[in-house]
Amino acid sequence: MSIKNKDTFLQDTLDHMPVVFFVKDIDDRYLNVNAEFEKLFNWHRKNVIGKTGSDLFPKEVNDTLRLNDIEVIQQRKAKVWIETVYDYQGRPRIYETHKFPYFDDEGNVYAVGGIALEITDKIKAEEQLEANRKVLLRSARMAAVGEMAGGIAHEINNPLEVIHAHHYLMQEMSEKNETQGENWAKNLKVINDAIVRIQRIIKGLLAFARQSTNDPKVETSVSEILAELFELCYGRMARKGVALTFPKIDPKIKIECRPYQISQILLNLLNNAVDVVSSLPERWIQLEFKEKEEIFEFRVIDSGKGIPETIRHKLFESFFTTKEFGFGSGLGLSISRGLALEHNGSLEIDEKAKNTTFILRVPKKQI
């Protein structure tokens, strides 16, 4: 086979590859491109070879491409980049570009080759998946709050009734010009305490309901997370006759997290526990905490006798539920485990425990 035929053979091979291929010298001049390159930019090969990237691409695009080339030249080894260019119709196209150096006989880099695989659809699909995940998280959060809605309404209604009753007493005292005595001050304090109680409940509800997917992880007191969580839980548990016990926790203990995502995990576990134990003779839920050197551990224990082995392995699967139709989507535990993993933590069942026990482990510091 002649040299000419070898060149033709090589070019034919490159032109039939379903990827973009190019070679540039160290001064950024194109030495060769394949048919996919021509098709992408609607340029003929003869109009590309000999030109630099700055001759062909907008400055902001070529600056990035050139910096990546230079790194390959300087480090003398192959690198992989995610690069964005614009096709002949002006549409952004995203590529996973494998760039590699060519060496001459003396070991000097004289050119950079590139093989670029388009991943535009993959990136868009991932972005759509992430958008769907955010919607799902928000829906799950709203569903968790919805399960507590009756209890929350009760928790707000109680202090409202207190305010109404003491306001009536103060009206009577005002009519009798008894606005300076000790009873007047006591009534004011009772009303103020009731208002603060309502504010705490609403603050916890609004904070929990807000989007938090993009929030940075911040150092947060575990006791603060639990205080706002309990404001949402007490009402429903009281109505169902479920006793909740937990030890006092040092306010100085902190974990680096998105606090409302940790709340979402715990609220889901508590909701599930309430659903299970509300039909049992013994109705209790117990929280336990363990602080280790690098990990903080939450344990949610209820009066149930554990998860049957036949369904244990399915429990964290999406859309798996043991609840009746219309009561639960089967996403709560799946989402909760995902949130735990996002925190470099874990959510699992304690299979050896006498009672149903879920363990949430979260690193104190995120890497």
Image (tube, rainbow, N blue to C red):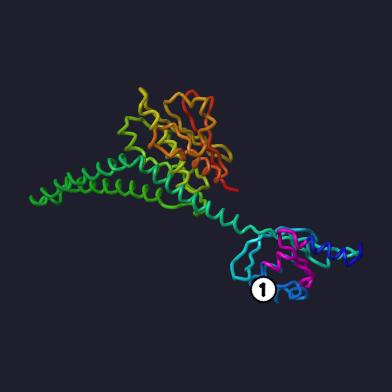
Between residue 9 and residue 359, name the one nearer to us.
9
Q: Position of residue 335 (x, y in %)?
A: 49, 42
Which quadrant would residue 341 be assigned to in this image?
Answer: top right
Q: Residue furthest left?
A: 176
* Image height of 127 relative to 318, above or below: below
Q: How many marks?
A: 1
Q: Is residue 64 above or below residue 136?
A: below
Q: Is residue 86 left or right of residue 211?
A: right
Query: Badge 1: few (under 14), some or many (20 or more) residues near its Cα, within 10 Å?
Result: some
> Where does residue 235 sit, x and y in percent of width and height?
32, 38
Q: Which residue is mark 1?
A: 57
Highlighted magenta segment, given as a residue range: 14-39
Q: Nearer the viewer, residue 280 or 44?
A: 44
What residue appears at the point 32 percent right and 30 percent down from the top-left corner?
241
Left or right relative to 90: residue 36:
right
**Image point (65%, 70%), residue name:** 61
Quarter-of-image position of residue 29: bottom right
What residue type is disc 1 on? Phe
Percent x, y of residue 219: 51, 49
289 sits left or right of 199 in the view: right
Quadrant of the rendered image containing residue 10: bottom right
The kind of secondary structure element at disc 1 is loop
Q: Nearer the viewer, residue 323 or 297?
A: 323
User: Who's the residue at 45% across and 47% down the image?
Assistant: 260
Check if residue 346 falls in the magenta segment: no
Residue 249 higher or lower than 10, as above or below: above
Nearest to the observer: residue 285 or residue 7: 7
Q: From the viewer's perspective, is 191 left or right of 110? A: left
The percent coordinates of residue 357 (x first, y second) are 48, 30
Q: Quadrant of the N terminus?
A: bottom right
